[in-house]
Amino acid sequence: MATSSQEGKENVSMTTTINLTMNTNSCNNDMMLIFLMNTTPYNVILFFTVLEAFVTSNKESKELTLANFVMKHKETIANSIKPGEDFRTHWSLLYSSIMRKHGKPLVPSNPDWDSISVLYVKNIITNQTSTTDPTPKDSYSGARSSSSSISSNNSSNSGSYSLQPNDKNKISETYATCPCHSFILDPWDQTWNDVFTEGDLNEIMTENAPEVLSLPAPLQRYMDKFSSATTLDQLREVALANPFHPIENPQLHWMEGSILKALDLLYYDIIHKYKSEADLMKRVWCFIDCAFDVGDVKVIAGEYVSKSSSARINSSRTLSGVEALERKKTGAKVDLLFTTAINEMGTAEAGKSTDTDTTKAAVEYGMKTPKVMKDMMYEMVTKNKSSLREIKTFGFIISGLQILPMIMDCPDGIVCRISRPEQYLCFPTSAKNFKSRMEALFRMVHTTKGNMEKLLDHLDAQPVDISFVRTGLPIPPSFTHTSDPSKKRKISNNKSSSSEPSSSSSS
């Protein structure tokens, strides 16, 4: 017989709780059974006790709204959330059941669920700060993970990371403006210089770091032929010396075509004349999506909505039976989307300015792209929980003629790490730097595609687990701020309001 595990509390039979629920005439028994199957005995008792007290202590029906209950019991709800739990549906369902049990009318309201999510994330950070147990964990239920709980513990030989007590306030200061609130850590980000030592950051960077792949031998031999070319004409002669068949030698054909298109840009001196992001993606960086013409990963260009981002933003959109179904919100729109029929694996954001210090570049590099990459990783981990260490997602930040490749992984649970070069890679601007820069760009694309194909092979080889029991996920989803959801601009009779810009897509 299942009982509560809380010290100092009376042991309560699970059968008593279920009988209490099932004897309610107005309850939806099927839904309640599903709920009980996915809730610990103590939580079941806690939920009913708190809700019963709320309903019986308020005489006025207008005060018995779910929104009022959530406002008064934020801490209780946040502390009771289990990893992977749809707490909105659970509490809405219980509220509806208790209200019917007492013959109370259901009053529509709009609970502040976002504030509960904020408290939940803060509780995780607080628990990680106070935990000293070095045992590795693979869930985010509040116990500290082994080498990815944000900070390094140099006194231990286990290579694990934990928040130091004096770091808590520093991380809290960056909570609203840093990807850390989505458990994303970029060791190159200047934000962490005041939190971690240089040794800590180096250890985080090198822990199971992604490998930059070398070009296959045939491709490297082809690139070596350009070493002695010092003019555009000489480069063109080498490129045209031995045409490659698109079917028999697809990689060499792609490399040859990319070189010829890049030479055209230099011949006509038009790389500095483009006026929009679309111009850059269409002419300068087109070799990226062309590299995926062959293979299972496809590239979609042109402000396409990420399904993974949309799934996160609409995660609270449920048929609760209490509130009206919300309108579906738009996910983040990306300039390039790397996807298969099932999984989204990468993204790219482009800006026309070569200046990497612009606000647009900072937001897309620091917030938008990492969160979209995390959304993609979360969706893949949801379907392949045992493959957390192998799953990676990929991103590109394009600023004019510069590009920054990024790889996101989760080397040891909970925190997702961003790996990238220290500096942007540059598109060639003359015959002198043509070979070296194009070779670096080709290696970048080959590394991205090679890792994607390796990941697909790994996922395809995994056994399919069929289970009707909900289990927690080893990483939390990206944080969705209350200002994230996109809303259509309201039409007003006031002429001044017609000039206001519409909201951007959610991040």
Image (cartoon, helix red, strand yellow):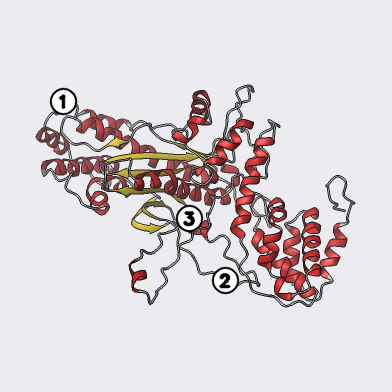
Residue topped by disc 1: 228
The answer to which of marks 2 and 3 sits earlier in the sequence is: 3
Query: What is the spatial separation of the Cα atoms under label 2 and label 1, in whole angstroms?
Result: 66 Å
Where in the figure is residue 413, as x and y percent of width and height? 59, 39
In the rendering, which numbered label is found on residue 296?
A: none
Kindly tell me whether residue 406 is visible in this rendering: yes
Where in the figure is residue 404, as x and y percent of width and height? 35, 39
The answer to which of marks 3 and 1 sits earlier in the sequence is: 1
Which residue type does callout 3 highlight? Ser
Query: What is the spatial separation of the Cα atoms under label 3 and label 1, in whole angstroms?
Result: 47 Å
What residue is shown at x 49% (from left), y 26% (from top)?
202
What residue is shown at x 24% (from left), y 30% (from top)?
436
What residue is shown at x 63% (from left), y 70% (from top)?
109
Which residue type does callout 1 highlight? Ser
Local crowd at mark 1 within 10 Å, few (<14), some, or many (≥20)? few
Where in the figure is residue 348, as x and y percent of width and height? 37, 48
Kindly tell me whether residue 31 is visible in this rendering: no
Local crowd at mark 2 within 10 Å, few (<14), some, or many (≥20)? few
Query: What is the spatial separation of the Cα atoms under label 2 and label 3, in whole angstroms?
Result: 19 Å
Q: Quadrant of the C terminus?
A: bottom left
| Circle nearer the viewer, 3 or 1 | 3
Instruction: Give the secondary structure at mark 3.
Output: helix
Which residue type does callout 2 highlight? Leu
Residue closest to the eye, 218 or 485: 485
| Circle nearer the viewer, 2 or 1 | 2
In the rendering, which numbered label is found on residue 309?
A: 3
The answer to which of marks 2 and 1 sits earlier in the sequence is: 1
Residue topped by disc 2: 325
| Circle nearer the viewer, 2 or 3 | 2
